[in-house]
């Protein structure tokens, strides 16, 4: 009986020490905050508000931050750009190596170009930057979430989504200047015709577009090799970024 009491007291002391160590460790970790997301006044579907890109750049201490992308209630994240398309595949906005990566603009393009390409990861984890884009495979979601806001330091570019589909083999959408013999207008029509759902968005030879690319989470497509969920929008307005 005496030995049993000693054993019980020993287990109790170990438990208390373990809890103290756990609490102490958590308190120590909380003293070293990691910037995860800047709190901003995001636009709603009814109004467009300005976003201070320079403030976000300063908050993150990252000069690669060139803008911000918002699809109300779907995506809200800074946009980065390097001199290559590899770095932010496996680095976060704090420049830490991270397989979740970041949302980044193709190094070959700028805000004023006729085609803007922006990339981000998807996966089974809920906090991957472009995971929600896979919901565009549902027609109701596609119809209800058609507006993309892209912010630069001084401008707000508004796009209306006209195409959503998963690409498995034809990757000329990433081309900037040549499109396998097609003109720019023919290239645009091809991107629209590939969409799972059609819209009445009118395209012309002068239209400018944005393409968002992420990995498809479609189980059937994944089982056959998988590829990319694409969301494509037409530029419908440009205004000053006032905040």
Image: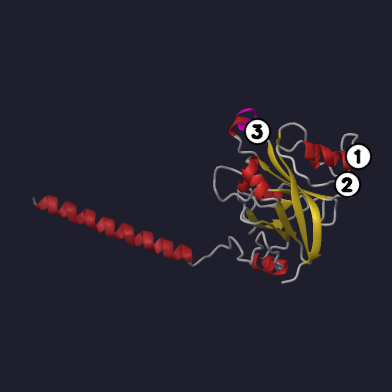
Residue 95 horizontal/vertical position (percent) = 65, 57
Of mark 3 and mark 2, the one earlier in the sequence is 2
Q: Nearer the viewer, mark 1 or mark 2?
A: 2
Q: Nearer the viewer, mark 3 or mark 2?
A: 2
Which residue has dot 3 on it? 226
Q: Residue at x 64, y 68 (%)?
A: 59
Q: Is 122 inside the magenta-drawn segment?
A: no
Residue 56 horizontal/vertical position (percent) = 67, 66
Which residue has dot 2 on it? 204
Q: Which portion, as a residue range, is magenta?
A: 221-226
- Distance from the alpha carbon under mark 1 to that under mark 2: 11 Å
- Distance from the alpha carbon under mark 3 to that under mark 1: 28 Å
Q: Are marks 3 and 2 in contact (CB under 8 Å)?
A: no
Q: Residue at x 21, y 55 (%)?
A: 10
State whether residue 61 appears in this view.
yes
Q: Residue at x 75, y 51 (%)?
A: 160
Residue 150 horizontal/vertical position (percent) = 74, 58
| 215 to the left or right of 25 | right
On the rendered image, what quadrant is the C terminus found in? bottom right
Work out which residue is located at the far top of the displayed protein and give it: 224
Q: Is 225 inside the magenta-drawn segment?
A: yes
- Distance from the alpha carbon under mark 3 to that under mark 2: 32 Å
Instruction: Give the quadrant of residue 44.
Output: bottom right
Q: Residues within 10 Å of mark 2 (few under 14, many from 20)?
A: few
Q: Residues within 10 Å of mark 1 (few under 14, many from 20)?
A: few
């Amino acid at each position: 009986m005496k030995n049993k009491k000693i054993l019980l007291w020993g287990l109790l002391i170990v438990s208390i020490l373990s809890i103290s160590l756990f609490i102490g460790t958590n308190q120590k970790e909380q003293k070293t905050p990691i910037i995860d997301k800047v709190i901003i006044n995001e636009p709603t579907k009814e109004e467009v508000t300005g976003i201070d890109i320079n403030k976000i750049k300063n908050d993150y201490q990252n000069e690669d931050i060139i803008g911000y992308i918002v699809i109300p209630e779907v995506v809200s994240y800074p946009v980065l750009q390097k001199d290559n398309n590899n770095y932010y595949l496996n680095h976060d906005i704090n420049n830490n190596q991270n397989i979740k990566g970041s949302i980044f603009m193709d190094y070959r393009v700028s805000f004023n170009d006729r085609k803007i390409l922006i990339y981000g990861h998807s996966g089974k984890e809920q906090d991957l930057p472009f995971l929600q884009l896979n919901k565009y495979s549902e027609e109701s979601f596609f119809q209800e979430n058609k507006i993309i806001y892209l912010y630069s330091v001084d401008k707000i570019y508004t796009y209306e989504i006209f195409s959503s589909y998963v690409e498995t083999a034809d990757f000329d959408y990433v081309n900037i200047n040549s499109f396998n013999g097609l003109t720019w207008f023919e290239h645009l029509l091809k991107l629209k015709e590939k969409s799972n759902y059609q819209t009445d968005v009118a395209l012309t030879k002068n239209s400018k577009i944005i393409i968002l690319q992420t990995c498809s989470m479609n189980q059937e497509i994944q089982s056959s090799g998988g590829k990319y969920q694409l969301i494509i929008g037409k530029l419908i307005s440009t205004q000053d970024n006032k905040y």
